[in-house]
Amino acid sequence: MKMEQKYYSLKFVLTLVIVSSALAAVLSALVFIFHYESPSGLQSVISENRDRGNSERIRNNNRNNNNQNRNNDDNNGNNNNSNSSGEGRTQALEDLIDVIEDRFIGTFDLDAFIAYAMRAGVASLDDHWSHYMTPEEYAHHLESINNQFVGIGVEVLIDDDIDGVRVMNVHRGSGAYDAGILAGDIIVEVDGECVIGYTLDELRALLRRPIDDTAVVGALRDEELMHFTVVYRVVFVDPVSYKMLDGNIGYVSLRNFDMGAANGFISAVEYLMSQGAVGFIYDVRSNPGGRLDEMSAILDFLLPEGIIFISVSTSGDEQTIMSDRHYIDMPAVVLVNSHSFSAAEYFAALLTEYYYAYTVGEQTTGKNRLQNTIPLPCGGAVVLSTGEYLTKNRVSLYDEGGYTPLHIIELTDDEYLLFRRGELDFDDDPQLQLAHSLLTN
């Protein structure tokens, strides 16, 4: 996205968690079954940190942070003392709690204190992709990776340079979609309560409602305040959409690599081939990544026999994922932008290394770390970077600062906003036009 203002983004779906403890346990088991199994037995994910900073800041800081972390690792081994023992660490926290309970004049919420402490502790790792999730956030996470959730159905950015919350996407069939909320609207009120300056957690708490309940959302559009009555629903997100373009060029858009993405992608390609497609455009612009098993299935479907993924554990052990000899022999172009994260940018990079596809768009973010989502006894979870991954040619997109497409062309702010709304037509999309011309000229 070509917005130059400084901001941090917190992409989330405003949702009500209605998952019971038993259902959460079942969902957790399903996640473990379907994720790629690492040697430790924990599921590996190459999705984006849902509460990450903006892609431009991450890309610019990747190399410096990586070097700093390596230096810290070297120093930490020489600086252990008695206070670093498990007992000492626990006692220090208990001492602080005792002081607050004894001396603090206000109300002390121990649960909130522990949640903040755990979040800060993981943040101290200085890793963009590791983060702590409260029990509520973890339940929402389990819903979102299955491409369904309960809520009003919007994705937003918390933007320091605007008053309010910017809507980046509205899911079709959701309460927000039917009420008329559009990408680009700026939410400033919920049921008459001003939300300017609200944190992510505060906004989630305010919007927590039972299914079929409503919320009145006040939003600015072109500086005009508008009000929308939004119904809470179960929202199903189809990660794949497709159509046939002129010249029998199949177009497949992939929103994420979460559950169902591989089956939907393969079905779309096979259908378009049955309708006479002679080439394909795979659009992973603003795709935040997702599950390793889903991405691997898609790459195995497209590519000939060979390496499609290399993972490196903290101990230096390597594992590879291979594709079989069956593949789709058809010219292709991949569309990427600065919000193509993780699996999306890896997808583009690997197809380039196989000389399988042209790539068009903007430089991606740059990420090469695997995350394990580890449930905790408190009901929450920690998403922790536990390994790295490399392309077939052993390229680290983290070290490279992202993937640079073969043909660089950018969208304007207005074009990008229309793209996020799903309203950027072929005739107004210079990236899509260039991709199409590469396959037809």
Image (cartoon, rainbow, N blue to C red):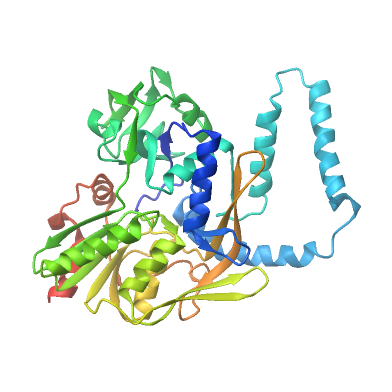
From the viewer's perspective, is 118 left or right of 311? right
12 above or below 439? Answer: above
Q: In which quarter of the image is the C terminus?
A: bottom left
Foreground residue among 203 and 411: 203
Foreground residue among 384 and 345: 384
220 above or below 67? Answer: above
The quarter of the displayed image where residue 112 is located: top right
* Position of residue 119 measured from the top left corner of the image (x, y, whole percent): 64, 42
Q: Can residue 284 be seen in this view?
A: no
103 above or below 134? Answer: above
The quarter of the displayed image where residue 165 is located: top left
User: Residue shown at 63%/54% (left/top)?
Assistant: 126
Q: How many labels does the image show?
A: 0
User: Residue shown at 73%/62% (left/top)?
Assistant: 72
Foreground residue among 406 and 341: 341
User: Residue shown at 12%/62% (left/top)?
Assistant: 245
Q: Point out the residue furthest to the left here.
A: 247
Q: Can residue 200 be seen in this view?
A: yes
* Position of residue 393 measured from the top left corner of the image (x, y, whole percent): 46, 81
* Position of residue 131 measured from the top left corner of the image (x, y, whole percent): 59, 48
User: Residue shown at 12%/57% (left/top)?
Assistant: 427
From the viewer's perspective, is 36 left or right of 417? right
Foreground residue among 102 and 274: 274
From the viewer's perspective, is 332 left or right of 348? left
* Position of residue 437 measured from the top left corner of the image (x, y, whole percent): 15, 71
